[in-house]
Amino acid sequence: MPGLLVLNGGDEFRPGNEPQDRELVAAAGSGAAYVVATAARRQRPELAVATARQWFGSLGLDVQELAVYTRSDANSSELAARAAGAGLIYLTGGDPGLLANTLRASAVWEAMTQAWLNGAALAGSSAGAMALCERTLVMARWPRHEQRRAIPALGLVPRTAVLPHFERMGSRWTIEGGSNQGSDGLTLLGLDERTAAVWNAVGWHAAGAGGVTVIHGGETARFESGGACPGIPAPVAPKSERV
């Protein structure tokens, strides 16, 4: 059975994230727990790793770094073997395009997917959550942060793109060549900071400090922590893209 999947809206490893992160700790398999700071490569990733270790340590889980920063790292057989045996993998926030482009069609991503299919818990926050979906939304025009374009991501959650930090800025994003109302076939998932959409064998539910907003076909629905989140496609392991 696939493991728990957590898509977090950002501001991870801080108070307010306890509900979803306690679910992750409880669902972690017997293998090692890893934080992957690929998305933060240009933003002092060692700080993200240290914060993750301290945070999860306070929840009773020892977390180590899986250092994947380049395409060479992402195709390392050693790192792929470690990922394949993981009990929990957490992708931090940072640059959503950098994360997707580094991991897509790589040995490490295939190993992460296989670990999840074998029951490991898998999570991403902000850029990490964005990359786990079919599309990730990158900046279309500098410095217009709110103008975004959709590019292929890792594809674990089909027909979906995440709007992170939804209550603070994600709700203002517009998608170049598409729609911020989800009418182009994508389900848009607005995740407030310190809030997650959590998938288990039953379905999706909201957890954390805020709410989850599901936008599709011009319809918008908001779900508060603890409530089910209908309308989000179920995750499916993507087909291998490796050549």
Image: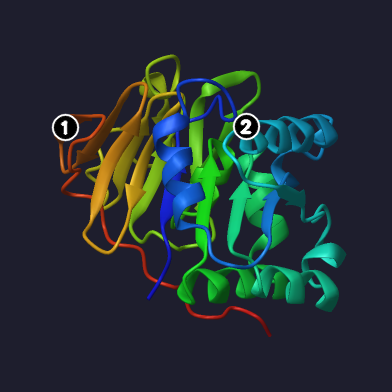
Q: Can you identify the residue that label 1 sits on?
A: 220
Residue at horizontal 56%, vertical 80%?
Answer: 240
Residue at horizontal 57%, vertical 33%?
Answer: 140
* Dot 1 crowding, Cα within 10 Å, few <14, some 14–19, many 20+: some
Which residue occupies the foreground of this view, 200 or 39?
Answer: 200
Position of 34 compared to 26: left or right?
Answer: right
Instruction: Indicate the amino acid at tag 2.
Output: Ser
Which residue occupies the foreground of this view, 74 or 171?
Answer: 74
Vertical position of residue 25 compared to residue 104: above or below: above
Local SS, label 2: helix
Position of 114 compared to 45: left or right?
Answer: left
Mark in the foreground, 2 or 1: 2
Q: Quadrant of the N terminus?
A: bottom left
Q: Which mark sits nearer the N-terminus, 2 or 1?
A: 2
Which residue occupies the foreground of this view, 98 or 22?
Answer: 22
Image location (x, y in percent) of residue 4: 41, 58
Residue at horizontal 45%, vertical 22%?
Answer: 16
Local SS, label 1: strand
Evaluate whether residue 66 shows in this view. Answer: yes
Q: Quadrant of the C terminus?
A: bottom right
Position of 83 compared to 205: left or right?
Answer: right
Q: Can you identify the residue that label 2 sits on?
A: 58
